[in-house]
Image (cartoon, rainbow, N blue to C red):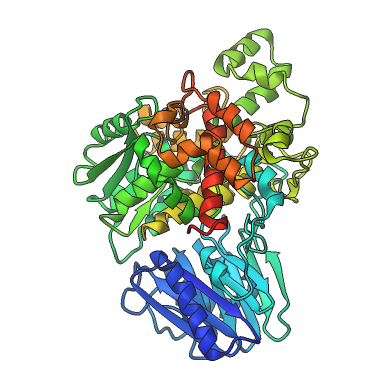
Amino acid sequence: MCGFSGFFSVSIGKDEGTAILRAMGETQRHRGPDDSAILLRGNVGLSFVRLSILDLATGMQPIVSREDETAIACNGQIYNYIELRDELSARHYETSGDMEVALNAYRQLGDSFPNSLNGMFAGAIHDPCGSTLILFRDRFGIKPVYYTKTSRGFFFASEIKPLLGVPGVRCEMDRSLLPAFFTYRYTPGEKTLFKGIRKLPPASILKLNTKSGEFEVKQYWEWCFPSCERRISLSEASEEFNRLFTDAVRIRLRSDVEVGSFISGGIDSSAVASIAAIHKPSIKLFTIGFRENKYDETGDVDAFLRLMNKRFSRSESIKRRCVSNQLTALPGIIRSIEEPISLGTMVPTDQVCSLAAERLKVALSGEGADEIFAGYRKFLVEAAALEYPTAPPEKKRKLLAMCPELSLRLGGSGEDHLMRHIASERLFSSDELIPLLGLSQKPDLDMSSIVPSSLAADANPISAMQAIEVKSRLPHYVNLRLDKLSMKHSLETRTPFLDYRLAEFSASLPVTLRVNLKTAQEKYICRESFDCHGVLPPSVANRAKKPFTMPIADWFSDTASLPESIQDIILGNEVDRQGILDGNPVRKYAKEVTGTGIGPETMISSGDRIFSIVVFSLWYREFMEGAF
């Protein structure tokens, strides 16, 4: 795991270019504290900082081909590099790692080369013979890359902060994106809240002509659902899932340093740890708990390890408790994430990454399963809503008993299923945004950044909901948070559920194998396979989902216990001073915060709303007011 940056410029000379590359590298040194290098030739410069994990002796980047001088600098891991190396025609290799294989994949396959890569990656390739500079990013946006174009050139980096110091960039906020942030809790799409700085979309390459300076972005892969569902039995699907999942974990254990695993009470991280322990019996497991019982999962973890005591007999379980006074770390967390996101996993994720980084450099995670295999409760509610209209009276009673929130869903506004899905997690309504943001009219939110353009009008509603999750929430919140906070602590995190083979398998399945109303289960095929193949005990495989989040409503309902900097925000004083939001609605929302009746399953609470205001205010202070 590493960080890369660079530029294309016709006006930057050698000395200035060297200084720029060094400064960009130092700004993201936490991504690669072990080594650094720069490559400057002609109008192109590349900078690289390394976290040494694979091919410790010869894996330093940028890697340059002897044959044609093509060079690569890439952040991430190509897990199938051993197999891919054998598939490519004979080449001379200077290294034994993964990135020279990726470079040769480009040299042999051209622009389509990312399709051959199974991994998490964001990188740059300079092809001097083809007068081309290419940026590329993995299918699900696990690894980030940002870019900007100024009067001095085209600049790019693994993080935003290196770009804030390059010639021609001013740190300005794009106020037009504030409605999106306060609606979704993150900013979907290619734009960021930093004016002029964009993200390369997942599964895309950016190709820049180093003669003209012109560039284009194109997508090389898309997660989509076939028009006809695959005919496959439950036992066949269970067997195929187990084969793919087991291999996804196996290849993510490839490393020249120790690999550990996060683990919670949920089935995703438990299954990842279970398969990993087969290959690494002494694997270290890292867990975060809470004093608040309804949020704490450490008891479930302990029970799981006891049930699987033979498999984990040599493993070490390491725990840390996340408490409210750790909110003092929030400014640093926001500084590391760079793009404001407002969900309660930030602080505990920071804590578990810190805990793991004290002992090793690589940890596995269960992230991505809920998006790929329809693991959120809202998918089950949608399935019940689809069946309810034509169900007989007795079945209707059972559906309402299974999903009490179904009655609210059935009495909705009449919007189609896509808009209902988007609205289900809307933090503030359009009417509420008007006074909060001082708008003159309701904001017009761009749905193109949320809804895939290729989504068929007649797509199954649950598949359509999943497609939205994978296009927007997965890269712009889930993966963003995990990458930035793990890298804050110089830790690499690997996500087996985001193996593209698993994703394509899931998309091919009948919806009933993802969400099953008979068993009232989301991620049905995962649970069935884990149980059938002994990955998890039945009691764990069938355990209800419990979201991993901190007790925002509990903590924020006691204003006096909060850090002073946060108190100043929720009381409206800091908000008034900054002059971006209206302090009066903020004070109103702060008074409404209560932990009563709120738990980890609560989609939106008054605590979530005030937390988004705190996150934005701290982000504004850290970046727009220059505190970072």
Residue in the image at 71% along x and 34% along y: 435
Which one is in front, 607 or 363? 607
What percent of the width, then of the height, locates residue 463? 66, 39
Quadrant of res 265:
top left
Total label count?
0
Quadrant of res 269:
top left
Which one is in front, 417 or 7? 7
Which one is in front, 277 or 41? 41
Q: Can residue 495 be seen in this view?
A: no
What percent of the width, then of the height, locates residue 275? 34, 47
Quadrant of res 68:
bottom right
Q: In this view, does 47 lie to the left or right of 113?
A: left
Residue in the image at 53% along x and 90% along y: 14
What percent of the width, then of the height, locates residue 372? 55, 44
| Residue situated furthest left in the rendering | 314
Query: Residue 514, relative to residue 519: is it above or below?
Result: below
Query: Residue 561, relative to residue 239: is it above or below?
Result: above
Query: Residue 459, relative to residue 109: is it above or below?
Result: above
Residue in the image at 54% along x and 82% along y: 45
Q: In which quarter of the image is the N terminus?
A: bottom left
Query: Residue 125, relative to residue 185: is it above or below?
Result: below
Which one is in front, 415 or 577? 577
Q: Can residue 35 be seen in this view?
A: yes
Residue in the image at 63% along x and 63% along y: 197
What percent of the width, then of the height, locates residue 547? 46, 33
